[in-house]
Image: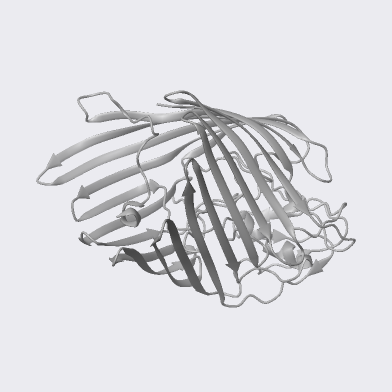
Amino acid sequence: MAALAAVAALAPGRAGAVDLVEDRLQLFGFAKSLTSYAHPTDARGRWETLTRLRPGLRWNALRAEGIEVDVEAVYEIRARAFEGGGGATGDEVGGAGGFLALGALPRVVDLDKRIADGDHLEVVHEVDRLILGVHHDRFRLLVGRQGVTWGIGSIWSPEDRFVPFNPTEIDQYEKRGIDAVRATLYPSDLSQLDLVWVPAPRGRSSDHARAGGRLTVNVRGYDVTAMGAYFDRDWVLGGDLRGNLGDAAVRLEATYTLADPRVGREARVPVRDAINAARLDPSTGMLLPGETLARAPARGDFVEVVAGVDYSVGDLTMTFEYYFNGEGFRHPEDFVFGLPRLAQGEAQQLGRHYAAAVFSYQATPLLTLNHTAIAAIGAPASAFTATSLAYNLLANLDVEVGVDLTLGARSPLGGRFAALGPTGALDLRLTRVTKGEFQNYPDIVYAKIQYFF
């Protein structure tokens, strides 16, 4: 059953692991280099090269009586060389426009270190996976730093509140690891119960923890899910449904959030035509105010809904998705108040209504053309497009070139906020204004090469 198989993957790259000691010790990972040029609407362009080496080891420590115990560790070192103005890949992981989860990840233990932090070069290394796994036909237990994914959405997923991807990120191959305990139970061949506990990040109170359960059952060929969770002072109830309707795959996902009114909007934030050096406090996820202050609108309970359909015609695969963001702002002048949660990865968009279309055409077995278009519906209208061409040079070696473009209406009101930097600094320079949300992201051209082992 497709949905029950879609649990958080711990598998290595598609090339498969390399057996080192009689199938008990395996080496896997990848090396990547992404070079990009970003051109914000109101700043000079920026060249950037992000290089990542990510080797991992998996040790099968025990196989007995239907139980397997293994240990997995993944080390990553990434170097970012840059020259120029506004950010291209955002934080060290990569993305577009820098609107990524730059705040403190839910990690209890500090296993990363910045080796270099210069004007044109940053180097960071860390342990991104460190997992003790216990596996059985009826359960799986994972303890340690791991990737956690919930939900079934393709572009957006309201259920995925642990470390969600921003829809504009260039590289979405794997998520960053968080410290968690995850137990997955299989009561029957047609059901699965997923339980996750993520303690509060180091230095923050226990009410910043995250925990929840997600039950999936198959009913007449449809996967039906119900979930309930506590995410960083918000309570969330939801569910999803997916299956086939004729030749198309359809899905529906929805959540209702009982919101803590303090979350993400505690601070007053600066709003004027020219602001410099406002900062995002990494311990609270709030903007530290500048000279001119305004209070955010009150935050109440909200609903999020994603509806999508996948359809294939020959070598062309199409995905269409609609997203209603009940937490979004109706007025563009309020977008600045959503920046803290957007920067922390706790929100994916600032507005309320969005539509997306994804096309993937396999021209040959080795050559694939991809195009994604995301539009903010209603006033103020704006759009983001990403087009890429990927070629499989060797079994384990890929090259890709792409361009991300943004469109948005301009206005003498509102403002433009520039990309977040890797240290959490936020430059709001509202010197050239725009109303469209996606127009706040830079246009990007890039080339990427990646090798899996």
Q: Position of residue 292 (x, y in %)?
A: 84, 65
Split into 4 quadrants, where in the image is the N terminus?
bottom left
**Is residue 214 among the parts visible in the rendering?**
no
Residue drawn at 83 percent across, 51 percent down: 429
- Front-lying residue, 73 or 100: 100
At a point 59% along the width and 61% down the height, the residue shown is 347
Query: Which quadrant of the structure image shows residue 251?
Result: bottom left
Q: Quadrant of residue 35?
A: top right
- Taking the image as shown, residue 311 lies to the left or right of residue 329, namely left
Q: How many marks?
A: 0
Q: Depth check: 415 or 2 in front? A: 2
* Residue 119 x, y percent position in the rendering: 73, 31
**Is 338 situated above or below 315?**
below
Asked if one can make out residue 10 in the rendered structure from this viewpoint, the answer is yes
Residue at 72%, 44% (x, y): give it.
405
How does the figure colour the protein chain or chains?
Answer: one colour
Q: Residue furthest right?
A: 412
Image coordinates for residue 69, horizontal then vertical, percent: 21, 43
> Does residue 373 appear left or right of residue 3 in this picture?
right
Q: Is residue 429 left or right of residue 7?
A: right
Q: Compared to 28, does 208 lie above or below?
A: below
Q: Position of residue 295 (x, y in %)?
A: 75, 72
Query: Could you tell me which quadrant the C terminus lies in?
Result: top left
In the image, what residue occupies the spot 30% across and 34% down? Answer: 58
